[in-house]
Image (cartoon, rainbow, N blue to C red):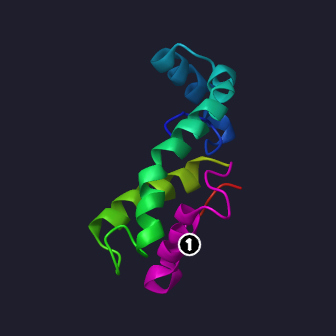
Amino acid sequence: MSLPTCDATQEEDKPYFAQSRFEWTGKTIDEIRAMETHALDTHNKALEPLRQTLAEQPFISGADPAFSDYCVMGGLMWAKTTYAGSLLDDNDPVEAWRQKMLDLFDGLGRGTPGLT
């Protein structure tokens, strides 16, 4: 999801964040937040090919994770650190894959701070 929100912005930086995003998008933070449902729906639809792939194999790259898995996971890690909402349902195959990815390298991904 590419909607800029200030969930991860420190309190003293929020006025600058809001002003710079208004200059960038022509919308207030509240107007941008109002677009969230549409953005989440778009995000969900975009993940459908990934769901189909993960229904047939454990990782995007096949039996083991590789470059494509890490590329997609990078976007989801960014979302984890900047978005307080939930992008995936618990029963989503992409969420099951994400959990496997978080467990790699002795759970390194689980130690990344995230918003709740």
Residue 73 in sight in this render: no
Q: Which SS type dominates the magenta stretch?
A: helix
Considering depth in this image, is 109 or 56 the residue closer to the camera? 56
Marks counted in the figure total 1
Name the residue tied to disc 1.
99
- Residue name at image x 61 percent, y 45 percent: 8
Residue at left offset 56%, top offset 54%: 81
The answer to whether 1 is drawn above or below residue 103 in the figure is above
In the foreground, 39 or 112 = 39
Q: Residue furthest bottom?
A: 106
14 over 68 or under it: above or below:
above
Q: Is 25 inside the magenta-drawn segment?
A: no
Magenta stretch contains residue 98: yes
The kind of secondary structure element at disc 1 is helix
Name the residue: 57% across, 73% down. Answer: 110
Question: Looking at this rendering, what residue extends furthest in the top direction?
Answer: 26
- Of 44 and 8, which appears nearest the observer? 44
Residue 73 lies in quadrant: bottom left
Q: Position of residue 72 (x, y in %)?
A: 39, 58
- Please state which amino acid type lies under the numbered disc 1: Gln
> Where does the image place residue 83, in percent across and percent down from the top left?
61, 47
Question: In which quarter of the view is residue 12 placed?
Answer: top right
Answer yes or no: is residue 104 visible. yes
Q: Residue furthest left?
A: 67
Image location (x, y in percent) of residue 46: 46, 44
Tell me if mark 1 has few (under 14), some (14-19) or many (20+) residues whose alpha carbon lies within 10 angstroms of its own.
Answer: some
Q: Is residue 22 left or right of residue 64?
A: right
Which residue corresponds to the image point at 66% horizontal and 55% vertical from the top-left?
Answer: 115
The residue stretch that appears in magenta: 85-112
Q: Quadrant of the C terminus?
A: bottom right
